[in-house]
Image (tube, coloured by chain):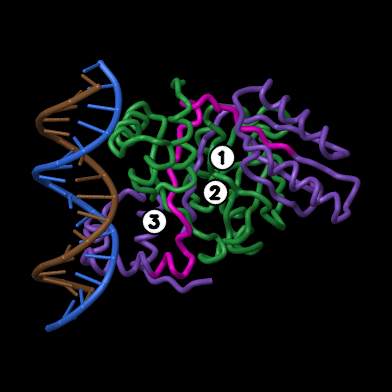
Chain colours: A green, B purple, C blue, D brown
Amino acid sequence: MVELDETDRRLLRKLQADASLSLEQLGAAVQLSTNSVWRRVKRLEAEGVITRRIALLDPQAVGLGLTVFVAIKTGDHSFAWLSRFREAASAHPEIVEIYRMAGDTDYLLKLHVAGMEDYDRVYKKLIAKVALSDVSASFAMETLKNERALPV
Amino acid sequence: MVELDETDRRLLRKLQADASLSLEQLGAAVQLSTNSVWRRVKRLEAEGVITRRIALLDPQAVGLGLTVFVAIKTGDHSFAWLSRFREAASAHPEIVEIYRMAGDTDYLLKLHVAGMEDYDRVYKKLIAKVALSDVSASFAMETLKNERALPV
DNA sequence: CTTGAAATTTGGCACGC
DNA sequence: GCGTGCCAAATTTCAAG
């Protein structure tokens, strides 16, 4: 964990919202010269606080408007099973997030798919590759908030 | 929904992985001149396929290593309740995603917090603002995959 | 040792072909 | 879709506090 001052936090908030801001614009926002900003950003990258810069796409525009959450229970808690599951699930680009959970569900998956049929296709492929004792899918009807920024 | 050719898809995959690539680097990857790449990217932005470019932070580095999913049921399905809930939940930067779900749970929230205590703090603030008939939190023990790229 | 101004280099952008 | 040149922004150097 890295120590951050208020200026770092303000820069991080700005960059999490819009990474295309110029050093000059960032400087104006935090009251610093462009190259003080440059140095801070470089430092934050070197410290591993900023990991990368990516482009975000509109899911609707690329025809992947349905978000699905899948809660999975396994009867088999062996390491071999975990390896198989991890490999099988990772191979599907539709599965964008995988968590090992505490409590009732063992694994939680998040998927971006075109529609129900597309989800069903992925589901069938997954159960063909690895044994799952209980699979429960929940479909998102509406996305009320989808923030990628961490609250720094 | 926008029609994309194979070159568009390859550019989108590249930019979703790393938006700091120069037009020259992108051109080398898709066998196109920097100029053609520039026009395609501009078009994809104009069409709303590429929405924005953001910086990603390491959750561990900024001390927000715990991901929590919260399934919520409400007894009150009025529009007034939805407005209140949406407003209350949106106000918390720790709540990064909110979905209205089909099926058993009404709403699913995803949070990034420092730890259990931090979650509890947000939970208490939320229930103080809006009536929730059933709240069930699930904590992620391990993140096996966390891909932001859509499978184009 | 830290900060900002000025110089240099690189990449983004607009035109003609 | 490609080549050329202009302009803006990123990066490096350097001088001052």
In magenta, the rendered stretch is B43-70
- Tag 3: amino acid: Arg
Determine whether the residue tagged by mark 1 lies in a helix, strand or loop. Answer: strand
- Same subunit under labels 2 and 3? no
Q: Which residue lies under the disc numbered 3?
A: B13
Left or right of B125 on screen, residue A129: left
Q: Residue furthest right?
A: B75
Q: Residue at x 80, y 48 (%)?
A: B106
Q: CA distance from mark 2 to mark 3?
A: 15 Å
Q: CA separation, marks 3 and 1?
A: 20 Å
Residue A95: mark: 2
Mark 1: give few (<14), some (14-19) or many (20+) Cα within 10 Å: many
Q: Which mark is residue A98?
A: 1
Image spot of residue A65 (x, y percent): 60, 61
Local crowd at mark 3 within 10 Å, few (<14), some, or many (≥20)?
some
Q: Is residue A141 left or right of residue B82?
A: left
**Closest to the observer, B90 or D6:** D6
